[in-house]
Image: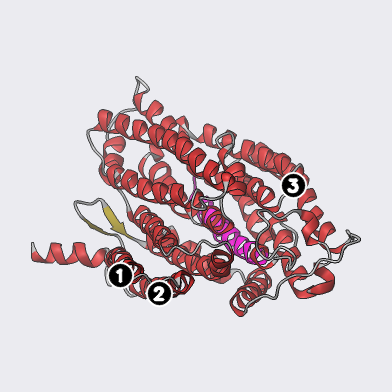
Amino acid sequence: MEYNSFKNITLIIPELFLGASIISLILFGSSIVSNQNKNYPLITASISKLAVLILLFDIVFIYNNSFTYDNFSFTNSITQDNLSTQIQLVLLSTSIVGILITENYSKHQKMTSFEYTIIFLLSLEGLLLLCSSCDLISVYLAIELQSLAFYVLAGYKKNSTFSTESGIKYFILGSLSSGFLLFGFSLVYGYTGLTNFEDISKFVLNTSYDKNGLLDVALMFILIGLFFKMSAAPFHLWSPDIYEGSPSNSTIFFALLPKLSILVIFVRIFYSTFYDYACSYVEVISVIAICSVFVGSLGALMQRKIKSLVAYSSISHVGFMLIAFSALTDDGIQALFFYLIIYVLTSICIWTVFMSLNLKQYVFKKTSKHLSDLTYISVLNPILAVTFCTAFLSLAGIPPLIGFYSKTIVFLCAMDSSLYFLALASILISVISTFYYLRVIKSVYFEKTTNLKLYCNIDYSKAGIIMFTFLAFIYLFINPNLMSLVCYKIIR
């Protein structure tokens, strides 16, 4: 009994440490504010630095956790395997970058209340627990913890009508999707009497096919809930408006983090647990995949605002990830996570440049950035222009960049599973999507305006992140074995 208790605690040390740190930061910030200290920007900056330090310690804890491979705790509701460990490391690394590139934005937007960083850490706590969850109850609780924090982050800028509207819209639609998800979970429990993924998998394996279709209905409701969370078409309608209306620092977290954890649960449920029922849902996933690629590509053609364009682009890339999943093979799951990690890396570069493009005449006061704001970057900061365009070319899948390699392995996995129509259609649609990526390059290099635009200087942290991601695009294409090895470990 003592060993099991020790194992339970040891297995979730990263989550426990993050939770304890959140409580400590709340007490720290509250004690300073209660002393009527009016230097709120300094308090917020110090908590942001402490948050980065906490996440670095969390990375060390995860990397050195002695219970790392196929261990279960808390009555088998939490697991620590290669899949959860590797994605948690990506989550924490991405969160550190997100905090670093949004620190100045929060200060200039007068979002100086220290609670913002703490609410973000709460959402990260939910995402980390979601990666490790292998039980219907723990999955739902982790999703709700993450979602509730994100609703607050979307509407955090209280003096902005757009931010308030985004928060309300995200809350209403997110609650609706959570209802679908919970109803699907309840149907699974009603049919099997189980909530643990491993137990459900054994039950399905040893039971004849569900002739009354109850499990099929349950899986459809679960799919709807998860498709909304990852903004796959036609369940994507919330994402462009919420991306555009939310504060830019919140939008970055929405765009980068949830897809990582949601796809982990997607794989655990539909690849590991209900694999024997694949005939009932694989066609639905294939249709949603091609619909997402189509809607994301065509929707982005009409966008002039950068955040809306990136939102529709993310919908298209979710479609490519679902195409890799539709293969229902180990190689397909490996291609999915390869594509996902490369997408996150490329998005980090794009969002870092986005946060660096601040016109001096507005000094962070402009609520949105248009493609017209990209003119003269090639003259004033050629390195920034090259990096920005390289990131978009990588998203488009242009060689010799790593985005070309990630799309290629997705198409190969689809064709290996005889999904020829899916692969061909996605290739043709991706040619259309290349247009709006090239339009960004056109705005950077070939469009000129009569008014010269002057930009604020870039701080050292953003410059370092931009340079690192730019070099990663080139290196990973030349030698993708490192990323391939990481993704191979994820599925083993």
Task: Tell me if I can see residue 82 in this picture.
Answer: yes
- On the image, which quarter does residue 384 sit in? bottom right
Q: Is residue 263 above or below residue 61?
A: above
Which residue corresponds to the image point at 59% horizontal and 61% vertical from the top-left? 342
Q: Nearer the viewer, residue 57 or 414?
A: 57
Q: In the rendered view of the protein, which quadrant contains the C terminus?
A: bottom left
Report if residue 335 lies within the magenta region: yes
Few, some or many residues within 10 Å of mark 3 (<14, 14–19, 20+): many
Label 1 sits on a secondary structure element that is helix
Report if residue 46 lies within the magenta region: no
* Res 433 label: 3
Q: Amino acid at mark 2?
A: Leu
Q: Nearer the viewer, residue 77 or 228?
A: 228
Which residue corresponds to the image point at 27% horizontal and 28% vertical from the top-left? 191
* Res 31 label: 1
Few, some or many residues within 10 Å of mark 2 (<14, 14–19, 20+): some
Which residue corresponds to the image point at 51% horizontal and 61% vertical from the top-left? 111
Q: Is residue 389 above or below residue 150?
A: below
Residue furthest to the top: 212
Q: Which residue is mark 2?
A: 50
Q: Nearer the viewer, residue 156 or 239?
A: 156
The number of numbered discs placed on residues in the rendered structure image is 3
Q: Which residues are magenta?
A: 326-353
Residue furthest to the bottom: 460
Nearer the observer, disc 2 or disc 3? 2
